[in-house]
Amino acid sequence: MTERRTLLAGLLLATALAAHAAGPVVDLYKNAGCGCCGLWAAHLERAGFSVRTHEVPDASVVRRGAGIPAALGSCHTAIVGAYAIEGHVPAADVKRLLRERPAGAVGLAVAGMPAGSPGMEGAAPVPYEVRLVLKDGTSRVYARH
């Protein structure tokens, strides 16, 4: 019986360590035909997140349900912890959000699909903003890239 308890304790510890090592879980909701969403997911995974991808007929339904205004919409919406992440938000900004937990925040958004953002890398990057979205529907600049 002691060996069995030791084995069980070891398995539980290994499972807990693996879950911790994988980082926060991100549920990504995207349309089936969008390839840049997968590139963004790979960016998050390289930064230590664990991404679960869900193909949905209309990602805007998830965006609306999460409280992200249509004006800040992009091609995909993700949920991590209690927050929505709209569009091509850099992993470092997501980590900062999870660390700081700003009062009244719904999540982060990068409107559209700006060249140079994670998953949209290319030859001609453009400056873009990451917006902190608040529960009242307003937003403010959270980061500039």
Image (spheres, rainbow, N blue to C red):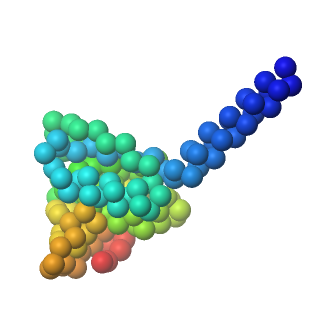
* Residue ID at (24%, 53%): 37
* Residue ID at (35%, 74%): 143
Q: Is residue 29 above or below residue 92?
A: above
Q: Is residue 17 above or below residue 73?
A: above
* Displayed quadrant of residue 85: bottom left
Q: Residue furthest top?
A: 1
Q: How many marks?
A: 0
Which sits in the foreground, 137 or 133? 133
Name the spot of residue 110 as percent of width and height, x first: 25, 64
Name the spot of residue 121 as percent of width and height, x first: 22, 70
* Residue ID at (45%, 54%): 49
Query: Is residue 122 at least partly visible in the picture?
Result: yes
* Residue ID at (52%, 64%): 100
* Displayed quadrant of residue 109: bottom left
Using residue 62 as the reference point, say whether residue 23 is left or right of it: right
Query: Is residue 133 at least partly visible in the picture?
Result: no
Name the spot of residue 29 as percent of width and height, x first: 27, 43
Name the spot of residue 16 as percent of width and height, x first: 63, 42
* Displayed quadrant of residue 105: bottom left
Q: Residue furthest front?
A: 3
Quarter placement of the C terminus: bottom left
Q: Residue furthest right?
A: 2
Which sits in the foreground, 7 or 19? 7
Quarter placement of the N terminus: top right
Which sits in the foreground, 93 or 123? 123
